[in-house]
Every structure is written in C-alpha cells, then in structure tokens.
Image: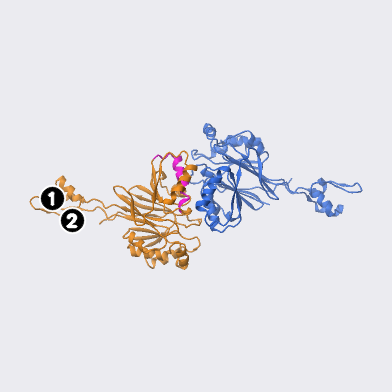
Chain colours: A orange, B blue
Amino acid sequence: MNFTLRVLGTASAKPVPDRHQSAQVLSVHGRLFLIDCGEAVQRQLLRFHVPMMKIDSIFLSHIHGDHLFGLFPLLSTMGMQARTAPLNIYAPANFGPVLKFFLSYFGEGLAFEIRHVPLQMKQPELIYHTKSVEISAFPLDHNIDTFGFLFREKEPPYNVRKECIGEYGLSLTEIGTLKRGEDVVRDDGTVIPVSVAAYKPYVPRSYAYCSDTASFPELAQWVKGVTLLYHEATYTEEYADQAAQRHHSTAVQAARCALEAGAGRLLIGHFSSRIKEPARYQSEARAIFPETQAVSDGDLFDLPLLRP
Amino acid sequence: MNFTLRVLGTASAKPVPDRHQSAQVLSVHGRLFLIDCGEAVQRQLLRFHVPMMKIDSIFLSHIHGDHLFGLFPLLSTMGMQARTAPLNIYAPANFGPVLKFFLSYFGEGLAFEIRHVPLQMKQPELIYHTKSVEISAFPLDHNIDTFGFLFREKEPPYNVRKECIGEYGLSLTEIGTLKRGEDVVRDDGTVIPVSVAAYKPYVPRSYAYCSDTASFPELAQWVKGVTLLYHEATYTEEYADQAAQRHHSTAVQAARCALEAGAGRLLIGHFSSRIKEPARYQSEARAIFPETQAVSDGDLFDLPLLRP
C-alpha cells in the first residue's frame, strides 16, 4: 500500500553536472509510473535501483527534449531486456509522429507493444484507473501542448470493525452493506450505523505533477487538496518577466498555487542553470507556503498511509 | 601540438552503472573531434571538463542508438548556448533522415548550421583535412552501414637547423628549398643536403577508431602503423560465436588486428554487460598484443610528440 515518489531529475533544459533533466517515478501500491523522461533517465533508474522492467506506464508532459530525450534509449533497453508487456505512453497528440519515427528507425526487435494514448483535453479527464488508483490529466499553460497529471488512490471500501461482527451478529449480507458505506436496517427496525460498525482504512493520498507551466487560475482548483504537489519553478522572482515570457513559473507562483490548492506539501524543481543559489527558490516559496521543498536528484518522498 | 584522447563511454548497447555508451573526444592541435554520441554524452563532456562549444566536428560510426542517442540532446544544448559555428557531422547516409526528423521537431531556434557529410565509401577515403590534420573514413563490417575513422597528423615541413643558417649563409630562397625537403644546390656546385641542414620536428601521430565491427582482413592494412588503435571488443573468447553472429569482435580479434597493423598501442572497449569480469578482456588480448588496455569511462591518453 505504498505511495512513493522518487525524483530522478531536477534541472530545466540546460543540464548541469549535479542535476539531470525532468524525470520522476511514482510507485502506488507497487505499480510504477514514470513521469517524463529527461536524458539518461535509464541511468538514473539504474542508479536508484528502480526496476525498469516493472514500469507500468509512462506519462509525458510535452515533447520538449529535456522531458523526452531519455525515452527512446529507455525503450531500446527495455527491448533488449526482452520486455513483452505492452506499454502505454500517455502523451500529447504531437508525440505520435515522434514515436512513429523512433519505431521505424530504432524499433526493430522490440517485442512489446507501445501504445500512445493521445492527450488533448481542455479540462481534467480520467485517463487511467485500476481497483485502487486513478490518474487524470489536465492541460498546462506552456508554449507547446503540455499536460499535468494527478495520481490518486481511490476511496477505499469501508472495513467492518471485527468486534462489531460478534456484538451485532452481522450476517454476510449485512457486512456487504456496511462495506458499501450503507447503514444496516434490520426488519425489526434496528439500525446499525456504518459510522459505528465500520471505518475507512485510509484517506486517499494523491500526487500532482505540474511541469512545464506558467501560473494560471484553474490549476489550483484542479489539484485541490492534493497531498503532494510538484510544481515547476524554473525561475526565482528576479526573473519573473522571463518566466512569464517563456510560459514558466517562479517559485513564488508555485507556492501560491500550493496555498490556494490547500496542498499538503509542495515540491519545486526544473531549476534554471542560470540561478546559482538554488536555496533562493526554497526561501522565496517558503515565505508563502512553508511546507515547500526544493528537490534534488534522487530525493525520495514516501507518503505514509493517511488514517482518517 | 597536443594529441589527446578522452574516452567518455565504454559500454555496449546495454548501459551499466559505471559505464556509459560509446563516445570519445580526440583533441588534435587543440581541435576537438567528437566520435560517436552514446546517451548522455553531453553530461560526460561536462563531467570531464571538455568544452562542448569548441567541438569542431562530429564523427558517427553508425546509427545504432547506443552510438547516437546522445547527439540530439547535445545539439539542443549547443543551440541553447548560442553556437553559431557550422557543425559538420560525418555519418553514414542513413543518418540523413534521422537528422532531418530531429531538425523538423526539435531544431527550432538552433542558430547554427548542421551539415551531414554522408559516408558511403568502400575503401579508406580522406574526408577532412586542415594544415596539420587529416581524417579518413573506411567501412567496417557490422550489421548496418558502419564506418571507422583514422585521425592523423600530417607530415610536418622540415625545420632548418638554426646553426646552419649562419654557417652556410643560407638565403631565404635556400631556407624555403630545405623546408620543402629538397637539397640546396648552389651555382658553384656546392650541395647542402636537407639531411644535414634540416630535420623533421616530429613523426606524425595517429589514432584509429574501429567500432562496431567484426574482424575482417583489410582492416589491419587500413590502420597500418597507427600510433593508437581503438578496436571494439564486445565479447571475450567464450562468446566468439555470438561475436561472429552479431558482427562484433572478441578481445583476441582486436589484439590480432593491432598486431598485424603494427599498432603502437591498443585500446579495447564496448564491453558487453553480460561479462562480469572486464579484466578477462584485457588478459585475453594481452596474450597476443601486450600493449593493450581495456578502457574505462574517463580514461585519458595523451600521446607525446614523437621525435624522429
């Protein structure tokens, strides 16, 4: 029942020695979701002992090189390691011809199917779900079609309190009723309230990935109440003009989004190589949203199970 | 007047934590030649303090991903760093559409011209020369069009011995004659032999890059007398069948080529991730050609000026 984020790259477009470009792996209940694929993502997976072959699916925010150039080397290696499980890549529609080109020139011998699921929504839309996880995508405001992703545990069914089973002599049908979150009403009029006889084992945890993007009003609503928010912060406040011009954000804008969304915690990254004091990102953001962390390559965030 | 090789990557197709994929930089008289571009070559350039913006030209042996996937991230970064100098890429003809695709999708904003010089020779051919360096390419035997490269200092002009200028009262015309390597014959019949009054400042140094390739008879002739030979050695002798089948070489085959070519020194690399004891490559090769070194990422080979 884990919910763990491993940050693999924290630089923006221009690489620097100690930071790779954007890539992250989110593990939810053991399923691995790879988010963006900056160059050398497969080396970062190796370095941090993430089992590459167990990647369930890939989420590409946009087709700028610093979020994409690590994908094809990774797919090639998956092929060499004899992956057979189909791989879904959720990516903007303009990723289609890029993938097609890769497959035609470098896809020989790949024994697994690569399915591009094109993103073109204008509002948040569910794109993936299992019994326990759901993932939606939403548009961001960048200079090319770009999407953010919200990963969320589904609302779990109620657990019936063991001591109540004996106490009330609950039948299997009644246990089922409670698990669905309904009160049991017996023929004799007795009511066994779900709030007494059952409980939610946990409150759903969630993670939102927002990169690259300018600040825009809807975003905070779309990630409302998220447990952990990653919001790009390419620039410090000094470069706010540059941020606006290039459809990027400042650390302060990321912090305002987190505050407005009521996020539990904010991670900022995608730092410009121009800013020589990364500590400034964090201090500027914390002035608005204290629960901010400027991320470094390799950072691990293990979200504990949230009890109600 | 330097002649220095920096090895950036030594793995074959499957990356391993401590080895990057094929890439090298050769510096000849201050000119930087990049040879192959495995993934993350730009990070390796950063790591070993090679000034990326001073790369004169690029030499791609073939378009397999492990020799190529680092190229486009590198070109993108050169663009961001505002390169304006045209860049020649010497690469097989089938690189053409790959470059075209890259430029159409990721080339926006590149302010320098990228010229693909297609290679399709069947014999060694001169592809590049300056006043002091010449580079030729030759076909290798791989499962896709692949070329090797021979980098060689040109034969330097003679230097006239300073003490002879006064002793013989040499005129400017006579100095010119000696520099061209001709004896001076005066009207009175006096002969001033070039062997007495002049000398070669150095013997040309050379470097040959041969990867990926099976062993074939002409290769040793084509790199005859090379000072430093890099020859791939994907497999140890145990996997000789695999080497043949996949158009690769064993360490022993690389050593035989060096021996037959009369190379000064042999470097082997492009090691398979399957072989767990890299020391075996070196010991197998040294049994045939003692001056062999199995290379590691970051190895530097500085060839001293060879005095005649």
**B175 on left or right of B292:** right
The image quadrant of residue B259 is top right
Read off the residue under disc 2. A195
The answer to whether residue A12 of the structure is visible from this angle is yes
Q: Are marks 2 and 1 on the same chain?
A: yes
Q: Chain of mark 2?
A: A
Q: Residue A78: x percent and y percent?
A: 44, 42
Instruction: Name the amino acid type tagged 1.
Output: Glu
Query: Which residue position holds label 1?
Result: A167
Question: Whole-percent x and y of residue A82?
Answer: 43, 39
Q: Amino acid at mark 2?
A: Ser
The chain that hosts pointer 1 is A
Q: Position of residue B56 (x, y in %)?
A: 62, 52
Query: Alpha-carbon distance for marks 2 and 1?
Result: 15 Å
| Residue A38 point in image, percent of width and height | 46, 52
Residue at x 48%, y 38% (from the top left corner): B274
Q: Is residue A150 magenta?
A: no
Crowding at dot 2, Cα within 10 Å, few <14 / some 14-19 / many 20+, comes out as: some
Quadrant into which the C terminus of chain B falls = top right
Going from N to C along the chain, the mark reached first, 2 or 1, is 1
**Closer to the camera in the image, B53 or B288:** B53
Most extreme residue toward the left is: A188
